[in-house]
Amino acid sequence: MTEKELQALSRSLEAREKAMRIRDLHAKMAAETESRGLPRVFLKCLNYHDEKACHAALDKLDRAYREAVSQGVAQRLKGRAPIAAQPRASMAQPAALAAIREAMGLKG
């Protein structure tokens, strides 16, 4: 084998090893994403060339996701302001009782 052929084989082997490392890291991150309860779409946001950087990025995504979810939940729980009640005539008022009696055809 010539030197060029050896170098080509070496580059090919390195490329396959790199692809395997990336595939393995992707599988690890998929399992970790699932165990943390994060959406799988986050896997597209990670850089799989360095395991340490990949874990750091997943931690940042996790924190941001949890914060966004808690803010959304707090916003939903806050709800709307209560509607102001319409003032009603009290049934104990004589005018209201008279109107009811008249409507019922009672004399009083």
Image: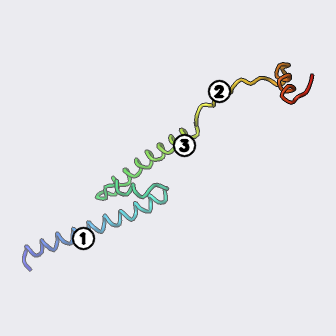
Find disc 3 in the rendering and name its residue.
Answer: 73
Please determine whether, in this image, residue 65 is positioned above or below residue 14: above
- In percent of the image, x 13 and y 72: which residue is there? 8
Mark 3 element type: helix
Find disc 2 in the rendering and name its residue.
Answer: 84
Task: Determine the residue located farthest toward the bottom in the rendered image.
Answer: 1
Is there a contact, CB below 8 Å, between mark 1 and mark 3? no
On residue 69, which mark appears? none
- In percent of the image, x 40 and y 47: which residue is there? 60
Task: Determine the residue located farthest toward the right in the rendered image.
Answer: 108
Q: Is residue 55 left or right of residue 69?
A: left
On the image, the x and y values in percent for residue 48 come to 31, 58
- In percent of the image, x 7 and y 77: which residue is there? 2
Q: Give the mark toward the camera: 2 or 3.
A: 2
On the image, the x and y values in percent for residue 99 come to 83, 23
Front residue of 105/22: it is 105
Q: Quadrant of the C terminus?
A: top right
Amino acid beneath label 1? Arg
> What whole-number distance in Å separates the C-alpha atoms at marks 1 and 2?
69 Å
Please determine whether, in this image, residue 39 is positioned above or below residue 79: below
